[in-house]
Amino acid sequence: MNKLITAAVLILIVGFAQAQDRRQELWNNVSFHNLRGDYPEAIKYMDSIVSMGTNLSKNYLYRGSLKQQAGMHNEAIADFDKTLELNSKIVDAYVKRGVSKLELEKFEEAIADFDKGVGKHSWQDSIAHRYRGHAYQSLGKSDMALIDYKAALAYNPKDVELISNTASAYMAEGEDEKAFELIELALKIEQDYIEGTKQKSVLSLADYLNVKYTLKLSLAYQQFHPLDDQNNLNIGYLYVRTRQPENALQNLNKIKGPITESFDFFYNRAMAYYYLLDNDRAVSNFEAAIEKKSDSGLAYVFLAESYKGQGNDTKACESLQKASELGILGAQELMDESCK
């Protein structure tokens, strides 16, 4: 009898260990495909995890999050519903369900879910305020949106998109002066971001897209105020960042005062010509910008590209070398590819 009991226990232990191994293998595949952005494949592995019947509230929540990232908002809501049926105290499920309802333009329902996320935990509180603000703004309730945006900004004071959304709400309320103060702040943060990327790959800048919100608001601002040189520079910069070089040059070429001798003026004009593939004008403006500020690694990178467009490989490699010395990691990679 004792031998039979021992054998049965061993079978249970082995079976449990095998199930654990299988579960870990599935989670590894979920993580792998999630990191690659292959959400449909990650969801397939999550389906297998859910079918194992353990930790269901957590697993429905995670699968719902994957479906949300894949844009499958109705299916995501169904999983969040199941999570809350199993445990109505999971705040994250309310907030995530609210985000999917917002995407489906079910604004009132989204607000009801975000209401349950406000005031619970700091990171969920921030998200709930942000997206509830979006929902109120979509309903034309800018006064309510402002309350939420300002609460979210208390957690994320340098979030350019959030700053811009707050400015948009101020403008809808007719408070354009407050809106423009925030536009100026957003612009400064954008400039600081660019300067802060000296130690990162040049390509990382391409992922920073929040500038489109500040551009929209800056263009709205000029309906209320005549544009001075600084504002023309700001809007020219924003057009450059959104790769609209012709529009950028229209604003930049209106500048007449001392700003025409600044690094920012030459650099933004150079970038506009760079995007237009006007290599000769790009080179002359990048060189002028570097004369004003010789430690701009990015200016050397784009100068190198413009030299290359002229067929001047020697000058291009010299500029890449300088960019590399200034800490632009992507410059060394470009040198390895094109400089012998």
Image: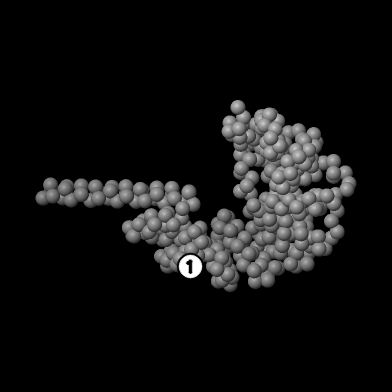
| Residue at 74% over, 44% down | 278
Q: Is residue 73 visible?
A: yes
> From this viewpoint, which residue is outermost toward the right?
257
Q: Position of residue 28 (x, y in %)?
A: 40, 47
Occupied quadrant, residue 103: bottom right
The answer to whether 248 appears left or right of 156 in the picture is right
Q: Position of residue 156 (x, y in %)?
A: 64, 52
| Residue at 53% over, 65% down | 100
**Residue 145 vertical placement versus 29 (above, below):** below
Occupied quadrant, residue 165: bottom right
| Residue at 46% over, 55% down | 39
| Residue at 10% over, 50% down | 1
Looking at the picture, which amino acid does disc 1 mark? Asn
Q: Position of residue 215 (x, y in %)?
A: 72, 56
**Residue 282 vertical placement versus 316 (above, below):** below
Q: Nearer the viewer, residue 12 or 249?
A: 249
The residue under label 1 is 74
